[in-house]
Image (cartoon, rainbow, N blue to C red):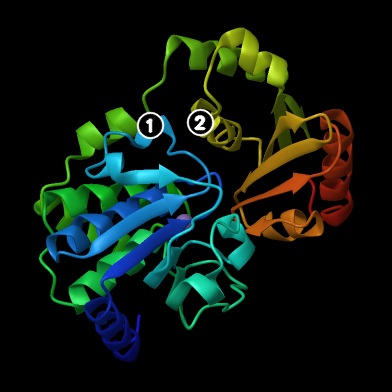
């Protein structure tokens, strides 16, 4: 984050009374942690701050300070002086909850995705940042803001989610240095991990069923979750967020895919990879995107058909590299 960017964001925050913070549809720990870090500080600055997303807060993030203030709405009717949009490579990723041109005076897009569409008045993009939380940390340091325990807890959460608890290739020395500062500021690694990675009886039953459908061919591993599996196990959709990572962690697997049935003709595919395999290019072929090692897309096909299309695309794309 450059000094100019920091100065501009500071100016806009101080000029604004009503501030909207939002992140992408199906929000994750990076968007939620980054947003709540901001909320916790902006409240103290006596700003009228709203953190509104299209989809509900996953329940594993309810422990985060300020989480009660996170709302979900499909359409916002108010106007704002400033909108801070987190982790959205395209404006559509917000779920179109507001007309940014008409209802917002100034918009700031803070993101770490390659190929961000630069749709806001100010675009602060750092594709090298391991998490948007890292960008928020640097911004707050740039403002000389005091990072208290609540803010540290939120940013720490965004970092462990996006680095897979310091296991992914984006885990740099800088990530550890910043994390050390967050622990000094009061973030409690044991407590946060026990909240974020907690499972339940129902989610474990769903996990067992997902694993019984697991296929591994060459270095590609994949499985699926149907609506029926969710219903029968009474697990929550957000309980499945970590499932893909356990497929990825299988030694023989370089590319992991998890398909989720959303509707008769809507299937969501999540991708994870390692050892240099790029899943962003695969997700992009189906209209989605993300990062090299973590991406996703929504396909307008029934589950089984989507599974076939995606897996054959992966084999096709990597025909030279598949082991
Ligand atoms: Mn992120």
When asked about the image quadrant of residue 8, the answer is bottom left
Secondary structure at numbered mark 2: helix
Q: Nearer the viewer, residue 213 or 173?
A: 213
140, above or below 301, in the image? below
When asked about the image quadrant of residue 256, the answer is top right
Residue placed under numbered mark 1 in the picture: 60
123, above or below 70, in the image? below
Which residue is depicted at the point 26% across and 85% down? 11
Which residue is depicted at the point 18% across and 77% down? 143
Q: CA distance from mark 2 to mark 1?
A: 8 Å
Residue placed under numbered mark 2 in the picture: 238
Looking at the image, do the residues carrying marks 2 and 1 touch, with CB atoms under 8 Å apart? yes
When asked about the image quadrant of residue 71, the answer is top left
Checking the image for residue 105, the label placed there is none
Q: Nearer the viewer, residue 318 or 291?
A: 291
Mark closer to the chain start, 2 or 1: 1
Which residue is depicted at the point 71% across and 41% down? 269
């Amino acid at each position: 984050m450059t000094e100019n960017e920091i100065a501009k964001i500071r100016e806009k925050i101080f000029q604004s009374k009503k501030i909207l913070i939002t992140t992408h549809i199906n929000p994750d720990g990076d968007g939620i942690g980054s947003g709540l870090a901001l909320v916790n500080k902006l409240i103290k600055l006596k700003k009228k701050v709203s953190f509104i997303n299209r989809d509900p807060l996953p329940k594993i993030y309810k422990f985060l300070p300020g989480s009660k203030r996170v709302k979900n709405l499909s359409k916002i009717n108010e106007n704002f002086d400033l909108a801070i949009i987190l982790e959205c490579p395209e404006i559509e990723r917000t779920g179109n909850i507001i007309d940014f041109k008409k209802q917002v005076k100034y918009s700031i897009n803070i993101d770490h995705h390659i190929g961000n569409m630069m749709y806001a008045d100010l675009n602060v993009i750092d594709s090298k940042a391991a998490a948007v939380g890292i960008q928020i940390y640097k911004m707050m340091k740039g403002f000389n803001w005091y990072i208290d325990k609540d803010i540290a807890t939120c940013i720490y959460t965004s970092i462990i989610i996006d680095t897979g608890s310091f296991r992914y290739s984006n885990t740099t020395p800088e990530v550890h240095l910043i994390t050390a500062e967050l622990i000094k500021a009061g973030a409690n690694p044991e407590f946060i991990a026990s909240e974020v990675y907690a499972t339940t009886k129902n989610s474990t039953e769903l996990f067992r069923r997902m694993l019984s459908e697991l296929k591994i061919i060459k270095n590609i591993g994949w499985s699926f979750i149907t609506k029926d599996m969710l219903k029968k196990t009474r697990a929550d959709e957000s309980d499945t967020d970590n499932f893909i990572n356990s497929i990825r962690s299988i030694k023989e697997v370089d590319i992991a895919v998890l398909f989720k049935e959303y509707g008769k003709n809507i299937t969501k595919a999540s991708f994870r990879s390692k050892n240099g395999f790029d899943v962003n290019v695969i997700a992009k072929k189906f209209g989605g995107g993300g990062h090299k090692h973590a991406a996703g897309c929504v396909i307008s096909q029934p589950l089984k058909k989507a599974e076939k299309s995606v897996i054959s695309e992966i084999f096709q794309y990597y025909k030279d590299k598949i082991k």
